[in-house]
Image: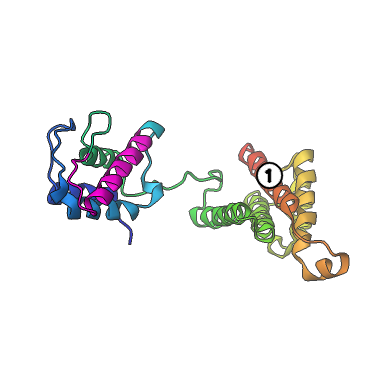
């Protein structure tokens, strides 16, 4: 279940009540056990990416939740203590006010490749870049290398087509090394970019089963980083072209 910050606000206001101030007035007594327990359960289902708060505010939210959780545990064994304050503030009201600072949606990421004007084509390449980072974070070196290399091929293909380069072979039929050579001959890449792109070609070759079987080599963190370094270097060089 996915709960939104606005739904936490609604829940607090409807089952506990709205306050005109967040100063603690010792209002949360043991008969609020079901309501406070429900609010804590709902908070557990708010996606972390929606809790976009400055550190001090997030720390305050964490403290409020801890105070409420400890109190609920004591209420459940028959204690009748009142919920303690958090720096003189009402814990549940602070939760409500902190939720007011959060959004119900995550803003879309800024394009990594804004120089590619075709939105569909840009989104397709950026999706592969995101996939590469996801696999890299999971230490899935094969996936990270593959996705980064695929994104690099697509960027070079776009660059060659966008520049209307005349090539012996149709750009769609070119492999990565041919795309790199064509882009370099046309002056779309610097010598450093060309060298990195060819290193990425070697890293991408590691995904082929025949090469793995023959040479006993596999994708590693180094191959993934090589492909990513080439990808971002080429993207930066192309973004600077008129």
Residue 70 at x, y percent in the picture: 30, 46
Location of residue 55 by image quarter: top left
Q: Main secondary structure of the magenta part?
A: helix
Residue 4 at x, y percent in the picture: 29, 52
Q: Residue at x 50, y 45 (%)?
A: 111
Secondary structure of residue under mark 1: helix
Is 205 situated above or below 7? below
Q: How many numbered circles does the render carry?
A: 1
Is 137 situated above or below 53? below
Residue nearest the observer in this picture, 164 or 135: 135
Q: Is residue 25 left or right of residue 202?
A: left
Q: Residue at x 71, y 46 (%)?
A: 230
Residue nearest the observer in this picture, 120 or 232: 232
Residue nearest the observer in this picture, 23 or 169: 23
Asked whether 191 falls inside the magenta stretch, the response is no
Tell me the quarter of the image containing the C terminus: top right
Crowding at dot 1, Cα within 10 Å, few <14 / some 14-19 / many 20+, comes out as many
Tell me the quarter of the image containing the N terminus: bottom left
Asked whether 70 falls inside the magenta stretch, the response is yes
Residue 23 at x, y percent in the picture: 18, 30
Location of residue 149 by image quarter: bottom right
Residue nearest the observer in this picture, 155 or 144: 144
Q: Residue at x 74, y 62 (%)?
A: 174
Point out the stretch of residues depicted in magenta: 57-83
């Amino acid at each position: 279940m996915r709960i939104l910050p606005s739904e936490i606000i609604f829940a607090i206001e409807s089952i506990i009540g709205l306050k005109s101030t967040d100063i603690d007035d010792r209002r949360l007594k043991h008969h609020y056990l079901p309501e406070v327990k429900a609010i804590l359960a709902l908070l557990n289902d708010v996606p972390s990416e929606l809790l976009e708060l400055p550190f001090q505010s997030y720390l305050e939210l964490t403290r409020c939740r801890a105070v409420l959780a400890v109190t609920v545990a004591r209420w459940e064994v028959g204690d009748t203590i009142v919920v303690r304050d958090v720096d003189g503030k009402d814990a549940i009201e602070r939760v409500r006010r902190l939720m007011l600072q959060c959004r119900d949606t995550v803003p879309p990421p800024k394009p990594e490749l804004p120089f590619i004007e075709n939105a569909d084509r840009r989104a397709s390449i950026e999706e592969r870049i995101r996939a590469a980072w996801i696999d890299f974070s999971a230490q899935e070196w094969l996936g990270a290398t593959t996705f980064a290399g695929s994104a690099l091929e697509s960027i070079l293909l776009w660059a060659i087509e966008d520049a209307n380069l005349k090539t012996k072979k149709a750009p769609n039929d070119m492999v990565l090394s041919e795309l790199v050579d064509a882009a370099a001959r046309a002056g779309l890449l610097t010598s450093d970019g060309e060298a990195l792109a060819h290193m990425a070609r070697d890293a991408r070759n590691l995904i082929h089963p025949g090469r793995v079987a023959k040479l006993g080599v596999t994708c590693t963190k180094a191959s993934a980083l090589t492909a990513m370094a080439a990808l971002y270097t080429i993207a930066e060089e192309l973004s600077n072209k008129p």
